[in-house]
Every structure is written in C-alpha cells, then in structure tokens.
Image (spheres, rainbow, N blue to C red):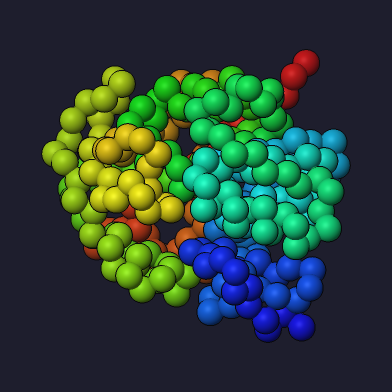
Amino acid sequence: MGSKARESETFTFFNILLDDGSLTRPEVPLFNLHPVWLSVERCLTALFPSGFADLRIADLACLEGGYAVEFARMGFGEVVGIEVRDENFTRCMQVKNGLSLTNLKFIQDDVRNLERLGVFDVIFCGGLLYHLDKPVEFLKLLSRCTKKAAIINTHYAPNKPKSPCTWKKWLPKRRSESISKFMLSPIETNEGIKGRWYKEPDLSHPWSSWQNKRSFWPLKIHLVQAIHDAGFPMVFEQYDMLGTDIIEMSDPDKEFLRAMFVGVKPASP
C-alpha cells in the first residue's frame, strides 16, 4: 500500500497518496510531511478554531494540486485549485480522479481572473507572487477576493544579492541546481515599492511565470507594507515554515530569501 507510482504523468513536486495506494512522486517524502504544509495547517487551525466545513478556500497557481488536496482533507467546504498550464492541469485532474474528495475541484484559468470565481474565506498564494511583474496590483486583487485571510509563501529580494538555499530533497536535481542562484537586478522601484527584477529563465517550464518574461521581487519590508496596504491590517510572518531548525535557516549568511506572510482582515461586525 502506498508504494506504487503513477507512470502516466511525471509529477515535478507533489508526492500525493491516492486512493488506490499509488504515489504521484514516490522518490520524495509525502507532501503532507513538508514543513511548509505543516505550517499552513497550523496557521489555518489557529485562525479557524471552529472548523472549516462552511469555508471556501482557493489555491492559486496550484501546480499539481498538492495543497488543494490537503485543504480538502482538512474538511474545507469548498476547495478550488486554479492552474493555467495544460500539463499541470492534466496532473491536477489525475489527482482529482484518483481521490474521493467531493469538496475538491480544479479550474484551468489565469489566477489574475480570480474575481470571476467570487469571494473566498481564505486564499493560499504559494510560489506565485515572485513570478509576477506587478505584485502590488495582485495583492490588491487578493484582498478584494478574500474575506478573512491570505497566506502568501514567496521569495523576496535581499538588500544585498545572495544565493539562497532550497529544500533540495523535494526538488528534481536539475531544478534545484537551476534555482540555487538568482541573478537579481540592482534595487529599483516598481509600483511604488523597492525591490529587484528577476529574469524568468524559461517560460515553458511548469514552474515558471505565465507570459511575463521578468518578475519583481520586493524587498522584505516593502512586501510587508504592500500586504498591509492592500487591505490586511494584521500582517505576520510564520517562521515555522522553515522547519524545526529555524536558527540555521535564518542565518544571515545562508538566508533563504523566502518567507510565509499571513494577512488577516478583522472579523465582520
């Protein structure tokens, strides 16, 4: 049980256990053991202590649907995974068809069309913001579509260029090597905030940006300000996404240049 691999599609990140016992990427640990997922789960449990049955959550640019699956398993009333690329969406549907989760659905669309899908209680924006050339505009879109909270897992630009580490055991070797050094521009201003431009290396890659050839990474404090100004008066960083060795991962000489920020709106009267 759980040892068989799916052979019809090559999954690039998520290892998901399907109902028939097969695994989507058996060479890495199950995704529900990933430190980032565990931190997201803890955050949602703290924000919604009464449970999730009446809540609607979106997983933006969901790749192969790993987070969306776990949201559905947590018991959210409706989980919507949004993915634009054909090959990624095909894998999402493989996952959907391999699970008996009636609260899970996938939609193929550009996440910038999010308003077409209405308002969500929570939006998860993981591995997406740093692939956009207008992050401030997108954060405002998130706010318009979010009732309670947005969880944003993203890279940010350093004050001095560095070579961030990565979770190499989770990544294909070629991919981990290709992102181990980011060639970022000098600090510039875009949309009224400071950051650095990142040249997207290959728009055909399943993890790359969609259409824009370069992306803007805000400096960390400018990103926090942008989340706040977009309509989330409470903004905090969730350090446990780094795993158990927070000191090591936060070492200034080995800075990960990636963080999970949570923007929270006040409860409606």
Q: Image quarter for residue 25?
A: bottom right
Examine the rendered structure and indicate whether residue 150 appears above or below residue 230: below
Asked if 131 appears above or below 246 in the picture, the reply is: above
- Up the image or down, 164 lies above or below 17; here it is above
Q: Looking at the figure, which quarter contains the C terminus?
A: top right
Q: Residue furthest top?
A: 269
Residue at figure coordinates x 25%, y 30% from the top left: 194
Q: Residue at x 41, y 71 (%)?
A: 172
Left or right, 128 with reference to 71: left
The furthest residue to the left: 186
Q: In this orientation, which residue lies closer to the viewer: 195 or 228?
A: 195
Q: Position of residue 223 (x, y in %)?
A: 38, 33
Rendering coords of residue 158 (x, y %): 25, 46
> Is residue 89 at least partly visible in the picture?
yes
Residue at 22%, 26% (x, y): give it: 189
Q: Quadrant of the N terminus?
A: bottom right
Nearest the eye: 162 or 179: 179
52 horizontally vs 175: left or right: right
Residue 169 occupies quadrant: bottom left
Q: Give the percent coordinates (x, y) of residue 164.
A: 29, 60
Residue at x-position 23% and y-position 54%: 182
Name the quadrant containing residue 177: bottom left
